[in-house]
Structures are given as C-alpha cells and as structure tokens.
Amino acid sequence: MNRRKFLRSGSLAAAAAVTVAGTAASGLAGCSGGSNPTEEKKRDSAEIAAAEIGRDEFELSEITIAELQQGLQSGKYSSVKLAELYLTRISEIDQGRHDLKSVIEVNPEALLLAEQMDKERKQGKLRGPLHGIPIMIKDNIDTADKMHTTAGSIALADHIAAKDAFVVAQLRKAGALIIGKTNLSEWANFRSTRSSSGWSSRGGQTRNPYVINRSPCGSSSGSAVAVSANLCAVAVGTETDGSVIAPASFCGIVGIKPTVGLVSRSGIIPISATQDTAGPMTRTVADAALLLNAMVGVDPADSVTLNAKDKIAKDYTSFLDKNALKGKRIGVEQSFLKGRQEEVVALYQKTIDQLKQLGATIVPVELVKETGPLGEAEFQVLLYEFKDGLNKYLSGVKKGVKSMSELIEFNKKNAEVAMRYFKQELVEMSNAKGDLKSSEYLQAVAKSTSARAIIDRTLKTNQLDAIVGTSYGPAHCIDWVNGDDDPGFYFCPPAAMAGYPHITVPMGDIHGLPVGLSFIASAFEEGKIIGLAYAYEQASKQRKVPHFKRSI
C-alpha cells in the first residue's frame, strides 16, 4: 500500500455550473484519456505559440500582488474590473476549452464585494495589503456567505457554514476579495488507498494545466491549478502531508506549508490535529510571503496557535533577500540523487550546483532514511484523528451528514456517484478506531512526532540553516481505475510529521512537467526558508506559464 497516495490530503475543484449528473457521466481518464485528437487541431494557434515562449495573452497573466496594487492605486484597474477579468478567465479556461475543473464554485457575490472594495478605496479606507485582490480558497474552508463548504463531497452539497473560518476572517480583514472556492481531492484525499488526486464527487477531476491528462496532485489540486493557470491572483490550500507542497510542485508554483500553529485551523474540515495547516499557494515567493502575512494569527478557538504568539514575524516579506543563500549551510537530501527517473536526478544535481554558485555550503544528509520508518505511526495518527476531528465538525452541520458513520452510509447509498471509481476504505478504517485516549494512538503520536527531534538533530549536528530536497517527481497520468501512481522523489513526510515549515519553488521541468525544490527548517523558521527560496527563485527563474498540452 503506497501511503503517499492518501497522505497527500488536499482539494479538487469543478465549476459551480457542473452538476453531479454531469460528473457521473464523464468517462475514465487514463494516460490517453480526456484527449480528443481533433481538439488539439481546433485550439487557437496563437495561444499555443504564446504559451510555448512562456507568456499568455491573458491581460493578468503572471501578474503579482504588488503589480495589481499598483494598477488599483493608479486607476488602471478597479477591483470590479479584476474580478470580471478573472471570472471570464474561469469561464473560458476552467469551465470551457481546457476543462481544468479547478474551481468548484464561483462566489455569486464576487462583483458586489468588489464594488464595496472600490468604494472603500475611493474613501481612503484600505483594509490591508490585499485590499481588492481576487483570491480563491480551498473548498474545505468555511465561509459564512453564499458559497458551500463540502470538502468535495456530495454528502455536504447543501452545507453553508454559519461562521467564517478564522483564516478567512483574517483574509477579509486584510482586504482579500474571495471570488471562489477550489476543487480538491475529496475529503482531502483521505478516503481511499487508490484514489485519483484532484477528483471529488462534487467537483469532478481537476487537471494539470501543463498536460491536461496528467495529475494535478492533491489534495489542494484546485488551488494549485487555479494559481498556475492564472485564474486568480493567489490561493489558499491546506496540508496534512504534502497537500500544499505536492500539487504546487506538480503545477509549477510556490507553496508554503507553515509550522503547525502559525495559521489557525478552526473552521477547516480536518484530518489531523497534529499535522493540519492551511498555507499560501502563489506564483512567486514574494506573493507567498504577502499572503502568509494575512493568514497568520492567534485564534482562541485553536489552542495550538498560542504556541505562535511570540513567534509570528511582523512581516514575512522582510526576509526576501536575493543574497540569502550566501554563506549559508544547506543540507542536501542524498536519497534523491538516485531514482528511477534519471532526468530528475540530473535536474536536482544541477540545482545543487547552482546553490553552491549562490554562495551556499552544501552538506550531504540522509533525513528520509531516518524519518521513513515513522510512516506507519503517522498513518495510525491520521486514522484516529480523522474520526475525532470530522465527527466534531459534522456535528455542527445543519444540512448534510452529521457523523462519519452517516457519511459512510450516505456514500454506500449513493455509490454510483460518490464511489464510482474508488471506495472509502480509509474512512471505514478510521471509523473503526477508538478515541484519542487509546494507548495505540498515544504511542503512534509519540513516534510520528519524533520527526521533530530527528530534523532538529540533523540541523544542529551539521550546523545547517535548512535542508533541501526534490519536492516530488513529475506528474503521473490520471488513472481512475488504478488510482495515483508514485513518481518518487517525495520530500513531504519529514516536515509534515514534525509540523515544521516547508516551502517549494519551481526548479525546472521534465518534458514540460514541473518539478519543485523544497526547503525545510525547524519550527517557526518560515522567514529563513522564505529568504532562501526567494534567493534561488530570483537566480533561477524556473516558473513557466502552463501550455495546456493534451498528452505526453
């Protein structure tokens, strides 16, 4: 059993107009699936040519938060105009000719909210650095508006949260304009051992914007694709083990998994109280730092955030330094210097050489060798905590299933739609577990979180500033019959089990499929790895505009 398949918890999206009936009617998408040979010929040749040389004819293609704010301040744009441009883009690209299905629901109040943002700007009342900037959030995060919160499941298709998640309240306070919710791997990819990342019964199959029949990974599939395909300025994802980092790597963007406790989890449909966190997903490190500024905060409803009270940086953009790698000692994970995909190994070695050129001292480490044996304990932790956390969340749902047991029965009764391609064995395994006082659970938590001591010892013994590795290998094909493949080179578990910060940044591509470079460090050292990732990003410039190819 390949645990990487179900530990990449995140989300999948489809447009609000897509119905459950439409989802059920779609066909299987294997490596050659989802591609009509005549479609390629029908595509606009100008669009293909533009993408191949790294640009996009879309007016807001690759635009940053800073550039958007300049446009808003100068009067070139209004928030209404930005919202209209992105909503049109969603209709044309996501729901239209490329069928990305990254957006599960568009905010019906988007333009009204944009008008309010413009009115406030004219009055000189700016809420914060994100004022009027269109963003999207994953569909497992509560919003007290006219959008639903479903974790991609038709079992919660009618659920509207009574209260904003704390992180949503923080984003609104900073002025963010939430124009929609993104699709995800259903229940954050903790449902089946052979699930297809990016698929949900409510949203359908999210597709990789670089090669349409390839996986976007999960579970924050929709957030990654929406950002990469320029359907919004930035987006928010969530992670338990790899759900921000892996789809960011597959989709050629920047993703940050913060230290657990830096960002509140209240109002987010949970998997694990030990490992869950929300995180920024953006096209640049600078935008990720800006978005993180708006997300952090101490929340009385999430006691773990009290640990961050004196550790939250005043401004994460202050760590953006092109020379941040100079004089730093960087641990390099050695296990990724071998593997079945020799081109990834070559790309990784080239990147290591570039880190040296940027002034870093390279120190070989074997972190994965030490943390790998903790995987079974981590799995047990997730099984126990998923049951506990989901039952607590569902108990407050007014329209929809009220418990994990009801969810299991709902899926069985609606199997033709809910479980057409894979089942729910992980949910059933979780439901069979006892409470959090169980000795099996307590022993598993102690073992899995020992990753903290392993990472800290590795950093201290080698006097390291951070550890790098490949984030994940190149995207595999979408396969609804056998589920996800494992391309290898996966570096998410160590920081996930430890609850430590992790950032990925594009480091190149293999046959047009992006591969990310990861930086991890100790607790609350987000600023440090943001600086290192920024220095590498600015020197390498590996982010490329998606080309929406049909097969490879």
Image (cartoon, rainbow, N blue to C red):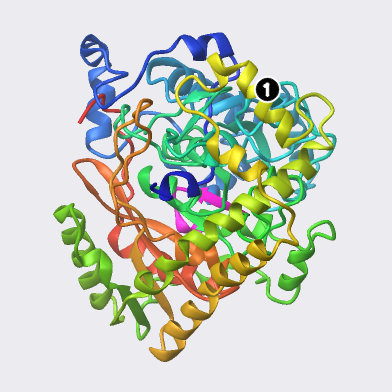
Question: Measuring 52% from the left and 33% from the top, which residue is drawn there?
Answer: 12
The C terminus: image quadrant: top left
User: Quick one: 91 or 485, which is closer to the camera?
Assistant: 485
User: Where residue 293 sits: x, y (%)?
Assistant: 64, 60
Q: Residue at x 53, y 80 (%)?
A: 453
Indicate whether residue 346 is drawn in magenta. Answer: no
**Dominant secondary structure (helix, strand or loop) of the stretch shown in magenta:** strand
Residue at 64% x, 16% y is 413
| Mark 1 element type | helix
- Magenta residues, start to end: 277-286
Question: Would you say 269 lies left or right of 542 here?
Answer: right
Q: Which residue matches tag 1?
A: 410
- Where is 289 relative to 134, above or below? below
Left or right: residue 487 compared with residue 396 = left
* Quarter holding residue 112: top right
- Could you tell me residue 160's position as x and y percent? 78, 28
Query: Residue 340, can we see it?
Result: yes
Q: How many marks?
A: 1
Quick check: 305 left or right of 347?
right
> Is residue 130 visible in the rendered structure shown here?
no
Q: Is residue 301 above or below residue 411?
A: below
The quadrant where residue 491 appears: bottom left
Against 222, residue 108 (above or below) is: above
Tell me: 181 left or right of 310: left
The amino acid at mark 1 is Phe
Q: Position of residue 161 (x, y in %)?
A: 79, 33
Q: Is residue 402 above or below residue 290?
A: above
Does residue 283 show up magenta in the picture? yes
